[in-house]
Amino acid sequence: MITPTRFNRSTLTLALLAALAAPAFAAEDTSEDSTLLETVTVLGKAYRNTATKTALKPEETPQGITVIDDQQLEQRGVQSLSEAVRYASGVVTETRGGAVTMFDTFMIRGFRAEQSYYDGLVLPLLNNWNLQPQIDPFAVQQIEVFKGPTSVLYGAMSPGGMVNMVAKSPQQEQSTKVGLATGSHSLKQVSLDTTGQFGDSDVSYRLLALARQKDSQVGGATEERYLIAPSIDWQVTDSTWVNFNLYYQKDPSMGINSALPSSGMFVDNPNGSTSPSTWIGADDWSTFEREVMMLGYKINHEFNANWSFLQNARYLDASLLQENTYHGAVYGPGGWDYNYWDPNTGNIRLLAYSTEEESKGFTIDNQLSGLIETGSIQHNILLGIDYQNLDGESVYTAFDKVYWNNVFNPSNDFINRNDMGNEYRNVDEVTVDQLGFYLQDQIRYNNLVLIAGGRYDHYRADNEYNGASTKADHRQFSYRVGALYEFESGIAPFISYATSFEPLAGTNALTGEDYDPELGKQIEAGVKYQSADGSQSLTTSLFQITKSDVLAADPNNFLQRIQIGEVVSKGVEVEGRWYATESLDLAASYTYLDMEVTDAGADQGLEGTTPIYVPTHSANLWANYQFYTGSLAGARFGGGVRYVGKMERDAYNLTGSVPSYTLVDMSFGYELGNAVESLDGTSVNVIANNLLNEEYYSCYDNDNCWYGAERSIELNVNYEF
């Protein structure tokens, strides 16, 4: 059962005090200070860079950043965050293949990005459960990929980086867009996006609604989603703006979460081959239902010409039910039996399980910022307090009846829900509180930009697993320093150093103490370029990330784990965009990654290996051509190529590699009003992903692999007025 925690009242009070203290601070302005304070630039409702929480543009930030705008999202017809970041440098996406669409799974610079962000606030994932909000790209204006540690502003996270999705927001200009889509896998979709102003009032609105249904790539499962997201902007006064937003999503069915052995996929097997549609689970035990409700608000206040304050808060209520099977070891009278898969016959042993999960939480971020000019030096000061409280419960039920199937001739009718053997329930209850204080000074002296920031986090977690309680209490300091110099030519070399931390669940069995957080650090240097007219941009980065205090086997006791492990990721990224002409837009990227486990404790077989999901080489190219004149006026042609190099098949690098692959995507659009005046505002788009239907794969280990997404073609028609 989820119950309120001891931190709730005090932290809400702290948040309110922060909101009240900021105007009080501004009210203390005296005549002596007025001359200085008049030089402060107010950020107000203006653009804020998520990487710095200030108005510093990505090209001025000493950090690798990829921005995917709404035009790119629409041209590529993405239906998930995993699909949206396919063309971003340093990112390996869809690590569980094309059929597992209920999770957004990807790596950034070799490290798993466990938690994504929506409008600057975290989408929580507790204890690596299955329940995490999955924002539909239809509700997103743009996506930002920040490379390297960003803990200095956001707290606990992976050292590889983070992804933030910027929500579509109300606009004053009235516009309504209705869409219909159909395509591969019996796709059926209807959508609505309407925005505008309520009469002559100071209130603007936006309403997003979507319904989608299609067949899964695997078996006879379906994927079904219903979404509604209303939001309101209220310009209370000239200096105060308030936004209220709701995001509700119901996923009655989200396909199938299952894997297959590599033998029969890309490893030859005398019995034949499996296919992207192969399903070895049970039709009567393949449920994945999810429901998410998020209610939030933002308050932005400009006190005077000196300081601005932003408060961003959100409440979350989510639940999930999963019923599935997996292949794995069983425990019997003779101990563990690992003979669950026979490649000579294709027989595979399956076990059934279910999970029921729920999560509730509150997250708030308070930002006070102002730009102070002292002579020729400008200081953009940012002070922040953020807090999150999460309560969750997961009930995992395992059944001891053993089922056998055959991967080359599968049956999907082998489970009787009334006869599944004995059941064993594990109840995991978690409460997490994280309170963070951060300070950042962004300094500009002529063409030189310097950033220095620090953050102090107090992280607490209470975990009760089957009645046994464990607690974690960590205090962590993170920081970042960076510099960038802008030459008049548009070239801007930069360098930065940043740290991160990720809490670990559990305790050391020998000492009884909590595991310390895993620590990350990165040094990055590179060059950014943007032409004077903005038509050309290029970022080249060299980086080294070290993740330490990773759990590893104890050399003195192989049954225990100690924190001495270390993983190092080194790489190069090149990413650019070029508006070659008014019609032609090109975007390209290349990533080189060298990653190694440098310390694995007593597990000598792991030391010196390359982790899974890490290709040495990857590259992308996307081109789009828009016709403005002639007989093809209103037409658009786009196409892309994605290359991902080979990856290790298992953590110990013993079973070979996952083959490299090259995929081709295509997009075509046409404004029908150019041909028939009465159809003005109507557009048609045809989008093909994996046009050549290339088979490709990803693997967790030799016996758990997934097929990539097979060819899909979508036709959508939109009417905007």
Image: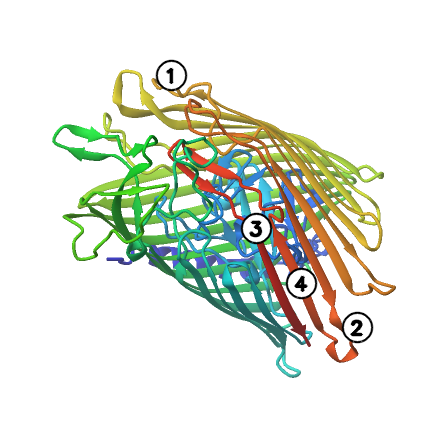
Q: Secondary structure at mark 1?
A: loop
Of 520 and 466, the residue lying toward us: 466
Identify the residue under disc 1.
604
Secondary structure type for disc 2: loop
Judging by the rendered image, the residue that carries numbered circle 2 is: 675
Q: Amino acid at mark 3?
A: Arg
Reply above or below: 525 against 154. Answer: above
* Gap between marks 1 and 2 measured at Cα: 68 Å
Residue type at mark 2: give it.
Answer: Ala
| Left or right of residue 578: residue 279 | left
Quadrant where the C terminus lies?
bottom right
- Dot 4 corresponds to which residue? 685
Q: Position of residue 504 (x, y in %)?
A: 36, 36
| Residues at circles 3 and 4 in contact by the CB criterion of under 8 Å | no
Q: How many marks?
A: 4
Instruction: Measure the alpha-carbon separation of dots 3 and 4.
Output: 17 Å
> What label sits on residue 447 in the rendered view?
none
Mark 4 or mark 2: which comes first in sequence? 2
Of label 3 and label 4, which has the lower sequence position?
Answer: 4
Check whether the beta carbons of the residues at disc 3 and disc 1 lie within 8 A of each other.
no
Q: Amino acid at mark 1?
A: Gln
